[in-house]
Image (cartoon, helix red, strand yellow):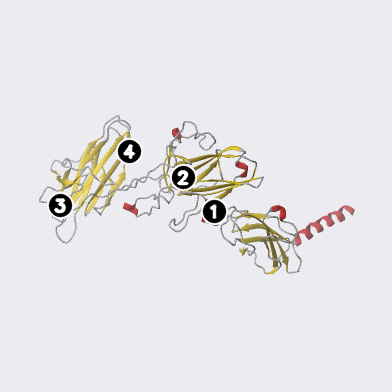
């Protein structure tokens, strides 16, 4: 019987413990213990737990202090809400003393149930403030700008059926153009681009494979056909030109096939008199074995820049390598706290002494960059050491530097990748040191990330890896960073 009595007492004790209300899962702005909150009145939330059903909060008390050591008793030096009669437990706005940049705020909460009993205090939670005033950054936007160029289709000619003056007037009809090409054997293809356009429309083919059409002569249909071609094989390249309207009007098609090989000179196939043309659609016209002996040579009307068409536009060159930036510095004294806030546009990763900080990718979040730019904050106290240290940042394009061309997609580009960074180091003796982004940072574009954007992904060449590029003393030795400095916006 004694054993059963002891068990009953143990279960009763456990039940009584569960019967009360406890408070947990404390969040600030929907996050647990977040870094870098930059709203003046952060919103606080918590959850209730109980072994009973139907438990309801009828009041709460929040206390917030400026240091963990001060969080004791029932009062807070930044904010003490007092007992607030409310069942609210989600997004309760902070209403204490004004908060300053980088301030550490520790908080806890307790609640009252319907029975009037108060819970124990929750475990202590924390948030840190971000940089609330732009002047507190003490930093400059840095990076390396390039040159925006619009590519023009050139080095080829407008062609049409050989009659009259097609650049002035031509019948409303469809013409079929073909050119048989045998690629050199034994020459590995690096890249092959087939581009074309027409007035009013031009559709491209490789054998019987439809590559799509362009119905605006001001822009070019651009096709990367590298994967469709093999050395030593024969192909038919076809163009279908369509002239339409209510009366005869200017007509023409224009194109160019550019084949780059791993070794040797580039091969360029222009639209000229070597193309054959017919006004009649015939079965198999775009196959290698087709008999085109009755077709005639196309008429070369004039160069790409001729009137009335004047330089059709192709896509701008949007491929560019990632920017690698590094900065070495010294922490002369014992560190008590170190926080770094940075905005790397369009995408960025931060490294401290050779290690990536955080696990985020595609960071910071996408924004309407002419209105706002997001930044992130990390506590890097444990990542720094007394003596020599180094910071490293990889900058990618993201949506800041347009991943698609203005010519085709009308994509807005906000600029070239840029970095804004502030590392604040607080020493045990109370002194402070800041490492900020400025023209003293080293930069290189000669790293392993050769190209990157949101739609096409990343092109990576492991042969160009930079080794310990974000560790101390690397940039001082012979390296891609030697002699290069970041530009300031």
Eye-nearest disc, 1 or 3: 1
Report the residue marked by disc 2: 395
The span from disc 2 to disc 3 (Cα, nearest Å) is 48 Å
Asked if residue 465 lies left or right of residue 127, the reply is left
Residue highlighted by disc 4: 191
Q: Earlier in the sequence, mark 3 or mark 4?
A: 3
CA gap, disc 4 and disc 1 = 49 Å
Helix, strand or loop at mark 3: loop
Could you tell whether 225 is left or right of 172 in the image?
right
Distance from Cα at disc 2 to Cα at disc 1: 23 Å
Q: Which quadrant would residue 371 be assigned to in this image? A: bottom left
Res 56 visible: no
How far apart in space, not on screen, are marks 3 and 4 (Cα)? 33 Å
Tell me if mark 1 has few (under 14), some (14-19) or many (20+) residues whose alpha carbon lies within 10 angstroms of its own. Answer: few
The structure residue drawn at horizontal position 46% and vertical position 33%, both measured from the top left corner, is 479
Q: Quadrant of the N terminus?
A: bottom right
Between circles 4 and 1, the one closer to the viewer is: 1
Of labels 2 and 1, earlier in sequence is 1
Determine whether the residue tagged by mark 2 lies in a helix, strand or loop: strand
Q: Pointer 3 and pointer 4: residues touching (CB < 8 Å)?
A: no
Upstream in sequence: badge 1 or badge 3: 1
- The nearer-to-camera label among 2 and 3 is 2
Query: Is disc 4 surrounded by few (<14), some (14 to 19) or many (20+) residues within 10 Å?
Result: some
Residue 128, position as x, y percentages in the image: 61, 54
CA distance separating discs 4 and 2:
27 Å
Earlier along the polypeptide chain: callout 4 or callout 2? 4
Question: For this rendering, which residue is in front, 286 or 120?
Answer: 120
Between 204 and 312, the one nearer to me in the picture:
312
Q: Which mark is residue 136?
A: 1
């Amino acid at each position: 019987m004694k054993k059963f009595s002891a068990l009953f007492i143990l279960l009763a004790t456990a039940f009584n413990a569960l019967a009360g209300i406890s408070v947990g899962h404390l969040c600030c702005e929907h996050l647990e213990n977040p870094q870098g909150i930059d709203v003046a009145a952060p919103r606080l939330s918590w959850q209730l737990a109980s072994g009973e059903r139907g438990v309801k909060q009828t009041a709460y008390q929040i206390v917030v202090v400026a240091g963990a050591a001060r969080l004791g008793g029932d009062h807070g030096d930044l904010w003490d809400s007092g007992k607030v009669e409310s069942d609210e437990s989600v997004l309760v706005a902070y209403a204490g003393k004004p908060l300053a940049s980088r301030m550490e705020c520790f908080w806890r909460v307790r609640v009252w149930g319907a029975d009037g009993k108060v819970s124990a205090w929750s475990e202590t939670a924390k948030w840190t403030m971000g940089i609330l005033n732009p002047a507190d950054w003490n930093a400059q936007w840095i990076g390396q700008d390039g040159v925006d160029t619009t590519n023009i289709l050139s080095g080829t000619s407008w062609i049409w059926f050989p009659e009259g003056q097609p650049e002035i007037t031509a019948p409303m009809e469809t013409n079929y153009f073909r050119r048989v090409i045998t690629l050199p054997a034994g020459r590995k293809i690096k890249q092959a681009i087939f581009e074309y356009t027409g007035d009013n429309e031009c559709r491209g083919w490789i054998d019987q494979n439809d590559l799509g059409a362009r119905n605006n002569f001001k822009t070019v249909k651009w096709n990367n056909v590298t994967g469709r071609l093999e050395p030593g094989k024969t192909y038919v390249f076809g163009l279908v030109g369509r002239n339409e309207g209510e009366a005869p009007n200017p007509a023409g098609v224009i194109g160019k096939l550019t084949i780059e090989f791993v070794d040797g000179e580039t091969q360029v196939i222009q639209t000229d008199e070597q193309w054959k043309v017919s006004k009649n659609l015939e079965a198999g016209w775009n196959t290698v074995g087709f008999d085109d002996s009755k077709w005639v040579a196309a008429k070369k009307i004039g160069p790409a820049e001729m009137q009335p068409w004047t330089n059709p536009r192709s896509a701008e060159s949007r491929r560019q390598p990632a920017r690698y930036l590094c900065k070495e510095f010294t922490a002369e004294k014992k560190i008590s706290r170190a926080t770094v806030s940075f905005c790397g546009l369009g995408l960025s990763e931060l490294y401290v002494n050779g290690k990536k900080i955080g696990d985020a990718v595609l960071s910071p979040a996408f924004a309407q960059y002419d209105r706002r730019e997001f930044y992130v904050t990390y506590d890097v106290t444990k990542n720094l050491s007394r003596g020599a240290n180094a910071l490293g940042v990889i900058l990618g394009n993201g949506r800041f530097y347009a991943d698609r061309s203005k010519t085709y997609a009308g994509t807005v580009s906000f600029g070239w990748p840029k970095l804004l960074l502030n590392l604040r180091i607080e020493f045990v003796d109370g002194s402070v040191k800041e490492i900020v982004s400025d023209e003293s940072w080293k930069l290189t574009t000669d790293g392993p990330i050769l190209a990157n954007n949101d739609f096409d992904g990343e092109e990576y060449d492991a042969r160009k890896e930079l080794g310990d590029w974000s560790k101390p003393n690397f940039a001082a030795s012979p390296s891609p960073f030697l002699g290069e400095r970041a530009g300031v916006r």
